[in-house]
Amino acid sequence: ASASEEKDLIIIGGGVAGYVAAIKAGQEGMKVACIEKRGTLGGTCLNVGCIPSKSLLNNSHLYHQILHDSKHRGIEVGEVKLNLENFMKAKETAVSGLTKGVEFLLKKNGAEYIKGTGSFINENEIKVALNDGGESVIRGKNILIATGSEATPFPGLHIDEQRVVTSTGAIALQKVPETMTVIGGGIIGLEMASVWSRLGAKVTVVEFLGQIGGPGMDTEISKATQRILKKQGIEFKLNTKVVSGDTTSELVKLDVDAAKGGKPESIDSEVVLVAIGRRPYTQGLGLENIGLELDERGRVIIDSEYRTKIPHIRCIGDATFGPMLAHKAEEEAVAVVEYISKGHGHVNYGCIPSVMYTHPEVAWVGQSEQDLKAQNIPYKIGTFPFSANSRAKTNLDHDGLVKILADPETDRLLGAHIVGPGAGEMIAEATLALEYGASSEDIARTCHAHPTLAEAFKEAAMATYDKAIHF
Ligand code: FAD
Ligand code: NAD
């Protein structure tokens, strides 16, 4: 690229937000360049987030099942050994296959991929410090900030990604620690606690709030999930705040304070995972050169069309408002390009599913019971336990329940909350129902194949206005 060349769109960041926008812009016939400094496309999600963590979750679940869940299924296995090096290689194979796939998709759609760090010179020019050395300048009619997020550090606790780790270190440990303490019982904390606990670590999760699962999880589902994870061997300390940490001894020491009147104590562990949330990443972008402001949480301030106060500079994904989820970033990427090319786009923020990929999975969409209560919105509830679902019973995998919230007057679906096997796939049906404004009776009168786990979803819907058949 050279200064003389003007792009229709320059994207800074090649994560899910940035690469999807690049593909979409290419499809719309725009001259587009996507700048990424990491060396591979896919951002946090593909490189150190969604994808590697799901590889570890899937394979640690298999390992744990073979070890502890095969005998009573009539399967006797010989010696079972974990080869952590190959276990990590399986993860790396998944990641590299997918990141190369994304690079191919950019090329296929005519989007230029520039390996380097982008920063604003002014409102239309971006300087790129190229990964291979040297510098170039590109001009853009439109510029999209898609620089994502990073782990929020814990004050006073130095992260070395070996003993004190963020999720990035936690997906790459070279040995199974004997003990691990997780600060923060949100999604990252619980997914990583599951992985290492299944592989043999004694894991304790310390959570500041009175419930696990991070923001948005329905309290009843959160409690059920905690019971299930506790049965699997994960220990929880709720209403407990980590006050300080000390890494000078062989074990990392954390001082914790019970938030509600309990006594202070200290916890020693081989590895500490800091999972207290993520914060937008805009360092080195040169926002000061164009006078763009951030809000108090470091998010780029935008309007409903993703415009910053400089209208041709927009921002999507983790760097701005909304849930930090890959599929949210992807929806915004399509919408923002449509705003630029056609003048209109759309994302329904009331209808973005969340999935926690523990076993069983936890998934939800729409409002939780505590959300509805807080807003004084009336609701009725239908629940159905997986212990009454024939497929879950057959699979000997029936912990959990489906909970449906619906409007008492119109029966319109308000929220769906699931902890149970296959919840992450089942939530797609709930999301579609919510998006189309379905009533719970619409769901319950839709024929579901037998025997499937999804019948639990149908029966929970039935239970909101009538009785479930199988419970
Ligand atoms: P990012 O993916 O962070 O991408 C931003 C990119 O911009 C980065 O690659 C960065 O290198 C690049 N960049 C930044 N500044 C510059 C610059 N100046 N010049 C050039 N490049 C730059 N979400 C889900 O929906 N499902 C999951 O299962 C899931 N699992 C997760 C597991 C973990 C361990 C973590 C940490 C996150 C997970 N997430 C998950 C969240 C998901 O990864 C993010 O929501 C998503 O990656 C956000 O996409 P993004 O493109 O906005 O940002
Ligand atoms: P989170 O916000 O989900 O959870 C952080 C938790 O840490 C909260 O429950 C909070 O109360 C707790 N906490 C904060 N300070 C604390 C302290 N001092 N002591 C004890 N607890 C404390 O954040 P996360 O789990 O770090 O995840 C970051 C982001 O990544 C989230 O937005 C999440 O949605 C996304 N993510 C999504 C997935 C998925 O979709 N499966 C997986 C991983 C990450």
Image (spheres, grey):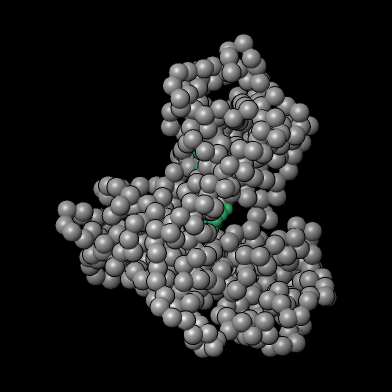
Give me the residue at 61% from left, 82% from top.
395
Residue 17: x percent and y percent?
Answer: 60, 40
Q: Of 259 and 360, which appears nearest the observer?
A: 360
Give me the residue at 28% from left, 71% from top.
262
Q: Of 220 and 204, which appears nearest the observer?
A: 204
Q: Please say if 102 is above or below 365.
A: above
**Does residue 20 show up?**
yes
Residue 116: x percent and y percent?
Answer: 49, 27
Give me the residue at 61% from left, 77% from top.
401
Check the picture and name the quadrant holding the C terminus. bottom right
Answer with left or right where residue 376 lies relative to residue 438: left
Check the picture and name the quadrant holding the N terminus. top right
Residue 60: x percent and y percent?
Answer: 46, 67
Q: How many marks?
A: 0
The quarter of the image that holds ligand 2 is: bottom left
Answer with left or right where residue 120 lies relative to residue 197: right
Q: Of 143 and 107, which appears nearest the observer?
A: 107
Q: Please say if 242 is above or below 168.
A: below
Q: Of 224 and 104, which appears nearest the observer?
A: 104
**Does residue 213 show up?**
no
Find the residue positioned furthest to the left.
Answer: 249
Give me the residue at 52% from left, 38% from top.
40
Answer with left or right where residue 250 lies relative to residue 321: left
